[in-house]
Amino acid sequence: MIPRRSAPRRRRVPLLGVALAALLLLGGARRAAAQAASSYEQLQAFSAVLNYVRLNYADSVDYGRMVRAAIEGVLRSLDPHSYFLAAEDYRRRTALERGELATTGLVMELVEGRPTVLTVTDGSPAERAGVQPGDRLLAIDDSTALGLDVEHLTLRLAGPKGERVRLRFARGPVLEPDSFSVTLKRDFVTVPAVTAAVMVDSVTAYLRLAEFSAGSAAEVERALRDLRGDGMRRLVLDLRGDPGGFINAAVDIAGLFFPRGTVVFRTRGRRQVADEEFVTRTDGRFRELPLVVLIDGQSASASEALAGSLQDHDRALIVGRRSFGKALMQMPFFLQTGDVVFLTVGRVLTPRGRFIQRRYDGLSPEQYWALAGRTGAGVDTTRTFLTDAGRSVRGGGGIAPDLELPGPVGLPAWFSEAADSAWDAAVADSVAQTLPATAAARERWMTDSAAWEAQLLPPYLARVRARLGVRARADSAVSARLSRILARRTAAVRWGPAAERRFALQNDPDLRAALATFPDLPLLLAPPRP
């Protein structure tokens, strides 16, 4: 039997308490009213500025264009990833996603605020025209490309199949570039998500994932099944340079390596609708496969979410350089005009609660993009988190690898001009003709760094010195990289594209470092000793 409670006694509330409560309520109401008045006054000031411009500016003003610029300025002040799409641009984006618009084959990024070619798709109009990664886009037809973000650049480069677009680029040193123009005929370009899936030795597979597209999980699974048939017993997953894509693709790919019900990541926002937990839906076919993941400063968004999840659950060793630090949840808001605002409504957290997004407060968009792979402030990574096994990892400012590797050795300023003049090709092609076309010669060339440097570097540097009038001095690190670049070209000319791809993998310093971790992988992922 549950005892019945006695009726509560009324308590007297002192008049002073009532008065204090009333004052507090009144004070709160006044603060709320003051904040509302302040917001109203700010909107009045903004409206007044627009009106002054409309009535008094020296030239006639397109009012709609001015309002759009104001909207873009508001979004720019929030974060580098919220953006505005006019109705026509949104229709073009939807058509592009449905595969109804053709493209040039260029993948763009912003480097220090300049639209720059990140990759050129094999067999695309841009590839056939000789456009190279690192070329800086100056103009599209008769309009400047400067000031456009990646989203609008992508839309401007797309169009009906067969339609021509004229592009002007700069190549070489920023202060003294060479400019050139190409006219491309847009075409439908198929960009595979998996750009390489090969065995690098009898038991180790290498898989390069270029983007997280709608069908990328199926591509990865097919490639892994084929590699397992070839003897794969461990895997290096390469996410370097992967800008991300569909976040659900990251969940599906993670599902290949995790048991069912594993948390891949969470989203958290100001409103509860933004709070969500993403978990794997099946038991992964490859959940027992030893795994090492490569990342760098251009690994962003979905690739960071996947790497962070694999790291938090001690499922893979992360090797390379700190990732970009972009992991925001965005939602479209449709205006009555048909225009769309894509607004950041939340942030992505790893399973152990780490924020991936790096700091952007107080930074211009140009500064933010220039700091790819860097936190921008030491305090961004002061908090330590623990993985499932108790290993320490840092939060904020991208995903820090478990094993950090040095970045590529910088090339001298004269290298761009020498490459533009094709002197590297001339030297490599000449040496290639002296090599036997046999399989044995090809195998020796793959690892004979002494031969590369002896046969390729002296004639190359001599040509640079004679043609450019520079000293062209190279220390051991620069000499090794230059020799490797020239030797790769030589392999392609003498033994074909397959030999070139194999050479690139076999002489990739990051990949070599990743392969070296496999013998100690269980120990590296084990809980720390007490």
Image (cartoon, grey):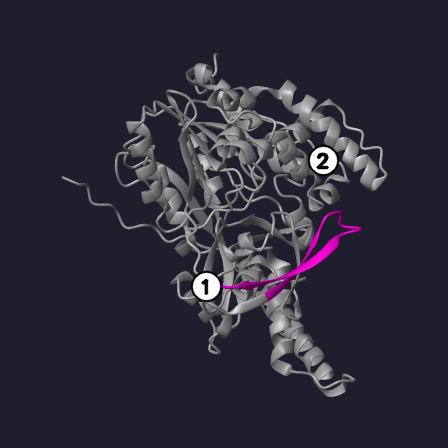
What's the mark number on residue 483? none
Disc 1 designates what residue?
Answer: 102
The answer to whether residue 179 is above or below residue 59 is above
Q: Quadrant of the N terminus?
A: top left
Residue 478 on image: x %, y %? 71, 28
Secondary structure under tag 1 reads loop
Disc 2 designates what residue?
Answer: 411
For residue 67, side relative to residue 329 (left or right): right
* Residue closest to the eye, 100 or 449: 449
Dominant SS type (magenta)? strand
Over which residues does the magenta segment extend?
166-187
Looking at the picture, which amino acid does disc 2 mark?
A: Leu
For residue 7, side relative to residue 349 (left or right): left
Most extreme residue toward the left, as rendered?
Answer: 1
Instruction: Write the residue at 76% across / 86% down.
Output: 56
For residue 178, side relative to residue 37 (left or right): right
